[in-house]
Image: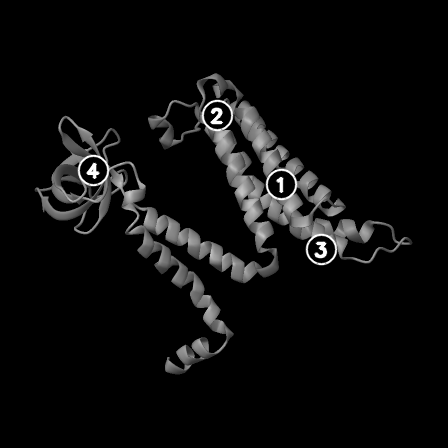
Amino acid sequence: MKKFCSKIISGKQWRWLLPILAFLLVFGLCAFDAPLYTQPVVRVTFVNNDRAQRAVDNFDNVDHTTKQHITGQLLNTSRRGHLVRFGNTFSASGAMDARLRTGQSVFVQRQNGGYQMLDVKRDGVVLGLLAATLVLMALVVKRRVWLTFGSLFANVLLLLVTLHLETSPANQQLAYLLFSCMAVLFTLVTTVFIAGFSRQAAVIATATIGATGLAVALGYALFSLTNYRDLHIEAMNYVTQVPQLLFFVQIIIGSLGAVLDESNDIAVAVMQLPHDPKRGSRPEWRLGAT
């Protein structure tokens, strides 16, 4: 173990410790960023738990809930340093809530002269993992790191814009069109970042869009023939959208990445073959089919 550690420190392998260092640095800095928020932030200093209570939901799932009495210290706003008290209820499953412990930071809001918890402050973990991921990508991708970052940023921006438009009441009926356009833009942006404005990019984009379109058409044909029988998504019990929309959006987004990855590999492999005018394009077709 000692030999392995000395090898990492003395050689070039030390750079693989940079993602861990980036995470620790950002995580530590986020512990002191409460003054940057306008929403009140409280650090928990004392927790008192009541006895757990048995609870049963509409699907006969059994859980246990516990009420907590929290005392904490404000870290920002004009009342910084003051002690506040509020309650929190968490379940044993932890699906939609969280158990608070001493030392955690949470967001709260003023309500009826007191304070109410909104959510746990998780920016340290989120930003720390983001920093570690970016540093690790920079180490792996090296010179093409800016293309990778640009592709990720563009795709995230497209997704946010699409979700913003889709959640608008005026655009509810255009959800299929919005997500279809988003899938096309995802493909075009990613292939341009991968292969530039080239023939290879056109081949990859055409194959990806065509295969994804066939997957959606196949899904639509099957469910039309069965009249959507036995289509059940449990999450739809808590939202107002129709299950058909959610299912087809999952087909579009789910198949897009896999198809794009395979199309890129096949196109690169085929285009590396030396072209023989006497044999025509048969070798390329055979390689692509396998």
Q: Residues within 10 Å of mark 1 (few under 14, many from 20)?
A: some
Which residue has dot 1 on it?
189
Q: Nearer the viewer, residue 157 or 62?
A: 157
Q: Amino acid at mark 3?
A: Ala
Q: Amino acid at mark 2?
A: Glu
CA separation, marks 2 and 1? Answer: 21 Å
Q: Which of marks 3 and 1 precedes in the sequence?
A: 1
How many numbered tags mark residues here? 4
CA separation, marks 4 and 3? Answer: 63 Å
Q: Is residue 276 visible?
A: yes
Which residue has dot 2 on it?
166
Which residue has dot 4 on it?
78
CA separation, marks 3 and 2? Answer: 38 Å
Q: Which of marks 3 and 4 precedes in the sequence?
A: 4
Q: Residues within 10 Å of mark 2 (few under 14, many from 20)?
A: some
Q: Amino acid at mark 4?
A: Ser
At x 58% / y 35%, what residue is drawn? 183
Is residue 285 found left or right of 39 in the rendered image? right
Where disc 3 sits, the SS reads helix
Q: Amino acid at mark 1?
A: Val
Which of labels 4 and 3 is toward the front? 4
Whether residues under marks 4 and 3 lie with C-beta atoms below 8 angstroms apart, the answer is no
Where disc 4 sits, the SS reads loop
Whether residues under marks 2 and 4 lie with C-beta atoms below 8 angstroms apart, the answer is no
Q: Which of marks 4 and 1 precedes in the sequence?
A: 4
Which label number is shown at residue 269? 3
Outermost residue, bottom side: 3
CA separation, marks 1 and 3? Answer: 21 Å
Where disc 2 sits, the SS reads helix
